[in-house]
Structures are given as structure tokens and as C-alpha cells.
Amino acid sequence: MASIQIKNLHKTFYQKSGTALQVLDNLAIEAQDREFVCLLGPSGCGKSTSLHILAGLVEADSGEILINGKPNYRDASYGYVFQRPRLLNWKTVTDNIKFGLQSYGVPGEQHDARVSRYLSMVGLGAFAGEYPLTLSGGMQQRVAIARALAIEPDILLMDEPFSGLDELTARSMRIELLKVWSEDRKTVLFVTHNALEAVFLADRIYLLTPRPTKVFKMVEVDVPRPRDLEDERLMRIHRDIIKSLVG
Ligand SMILES: Nc1ncnc2c1ncn2[C@@H]1O[C@H](COP(=O)(O)OP(=O)(O)OP(=O)(O)O)[C@@H](O)[C@H]1O
Ligand SMILES: [Mg+2]
């Protein structure tokens, strides 16, 4: 189990030219244990940077991250679907997923079952023995999703995982993701540009400003699952989000 509290996060990058680029400005985000939280913000505002900081891959200048109320991100396990697939091209699809499992110390006797469960979830059971470079970009991204889910982590960080997929595949992946999540709920932070996707998936959506980013609105999506995109309640929340984004 894992709750997340991100408080007063600040980050400035220094470009090669020496110019300071302030990316995060007092960012504050919370996710309760087993909650599905979306971060919705414009390109370049600092969404990936926020996830990198949360996973300990980039250091913040200041601010606090509490996992289960304690300042140690290592107290939880993370599954990370990066914005690009980041697969090991010299390993097969199966071995990419097993590599993730090994790194997280999942016992060997569970590997085959996990690989098969999560590969079939992303619709790639028939590609288990292939190498990443023989797959399309969207298929590689689905392998990366299976790799992150297979770890069965406390916290799932997903950085625009479906943005490179066609809308039909993305729709079925969203439904599959919610199925897996509802069976064994993880705390999810899911980054997207797509307001409709956020409304379909999330318990709560943080709307972020352009860089330097902070939260300008938090929206609760208090609609039971399974959800139907035609549901008038979802449509109304979507309209309100779009209204507040365009100002
Ligand atoms: N290591 C780095 N060094 C310098 N600048 C960086 C670095 N990483 C990110 N940035 C800058 O920080 C800003 C935010 O980048 P980030 O990748 O977090 O945006 P994002 O919200 O994820 O955008 P997108 O939606 O396009 O993926 C960008 O202007 C980017 O150029
Ligand atoms: Mg990004």
C-alpha cells in the first residue's frame, strides 16, 4: 500500500547556455492509497520531471515527498511506464519483462505466469519471443506497460502511456488497465494531455499550469466504474475541464 504526498516541489534546470529554466513552482499533489490520479497539463510544463523526481531519478531543488507519511521514496515499489518504451533491444519481449521482475526481486517461479498474464493483457501474447525492434512503436509501448504492471508495484507511474496508440487500441488498453487495477488496486499517477482520457480513468485530476508548473485546479471524478464515455456526468466534468483550460 502507498499514499503519496508531494509538497512545495521546486525544480529549475540550467540549460547549456546557462539560462535557468524554472520547471516546477510549488507543485503540490496527493494520491491516497489505491487511488487513480491523473496529471493533466500542457507539453513542456514539467509532468515527466515530476514523475522522475517522485521515482528518485531526478533531484528536486526543494520540497517534500512523503510515501505513507514518511520521507523515503524507497519504502514503496514503483512500476514506471516512461514516455518512451526504453526496452532492451537485445532481449526478447519475454526477457525484457523478466529483467524487470528480476530487478525487483520477484521469485523466479512466478516469472512465466506474470509474463503470460500481462503480455496477454496488452494483447501481445503472440509476440513473446520477438525482439523489440521488430515491433511497432505502439507495440513496444505496450511491452513497456506489461513490464511495469508485471512487477505488481505499490505505485504505478504512467507517463502518457497511450498517447502513441491509435484511439481504438488506446480505448481497449484503458479498459484493460482499469480491469487490472480494480482487481488489485495500486496507487496510480498517470500523466496525460488528453482530458477525456483523464475523465475516463481517474478518481481525481490535477490540472497543471504551463511552465513553471503548479496545480491550478483539482477535479474529483466521483462516477462509479465501469464508466461509459457517453455518461452525462463524465461529459459534464470533461466540459468543465476544457472550459477551465481555455480560461
Ligand atoms: N535534464 C534536463 N535539463 C534541462 N532541461 C530539462 C531537463 N529535463 C527537462 N527539461 C526541461 O524541463 C521542461 C519540462 O520538461 P518535461 O519533460 O518535464 O515536460 P512534460 O510536461 O513532460 O512535457 P511533454 O508533455 O511534452 O512530455 C522542458 O522545458 C524541458 O526542456
Ligand atoms: Mg513528458
Image (cartoon, rainbow, N blue to C red):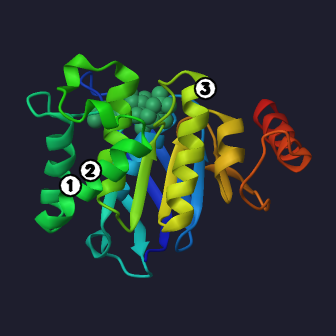
What residue is shown at x 35% (from left), y 21% (from top)? 137
Q: Position of residue 34 (x, y in %)?
A: 53, 70
- Relative placement, left or right, of 243 versus 20 is right
Using the rendered image of the protein, determine whether residue 52 is visible from the camera's viewpoint. no
Q: Is residue 1 found left or right of 148 in the rendered image?
A: right
Residue type, label 2? Val
Residue 115 drawn at (x, y percent): 26, 50
Residue nearest the observer in this picture, 18 or 192:
192
Mark 2 and 1 residues: CB-CB less than 8 Å, in contact?
A: yes
- Against 125, residue 206 (above or below) is below
Residues at marks 1 and 3, CA–CA distance in whole angstroms: 29 Å
In the picture, measured across the screen, residue 98 lies left or right of residue 233, that is left
Most extreme residue toward the front is 126
Disc 1 crowd, CA 10 A, few/some/many (<14, 14-19, 20+): few
* Residue under the point 72% across and 58% down: 225
* Residue positioned 65% across, 39% down in the render: 197
Work out how far the residue at label 2 is from the one at label 1, CA to CA, in angstroms.
5 Å
Residue 168, disc = 3
Query: Quarter of the picture for ligand 2?
Result: top left
Q: Mark number for residue 115?
A: 2
Q: Position of residue 208 (x, y in %)?
A: 62, 44
Q: Residue most toward the bottom? A: 69
Residue 226 in percent (x, y) is at 72, 55
**Residue drawn at x 91%, y 45% as measured from the top left:** 232
Gap in angstroms between the C-alphas marked 3 and 2: 24 Å
Helix, strand or loop under label 3: helix
Quadrant assignment for the C terminus? top right
Q: Amino acid at mark 3?
A: Leu
Extreme residue in the left direction = 90
Q: For mark 1, what is the residue?
A: 112
Q: Which picture quadrant has residue 126? A: top left
Q: Tell us which disc is closer to us: 1 or 3.
A: 1
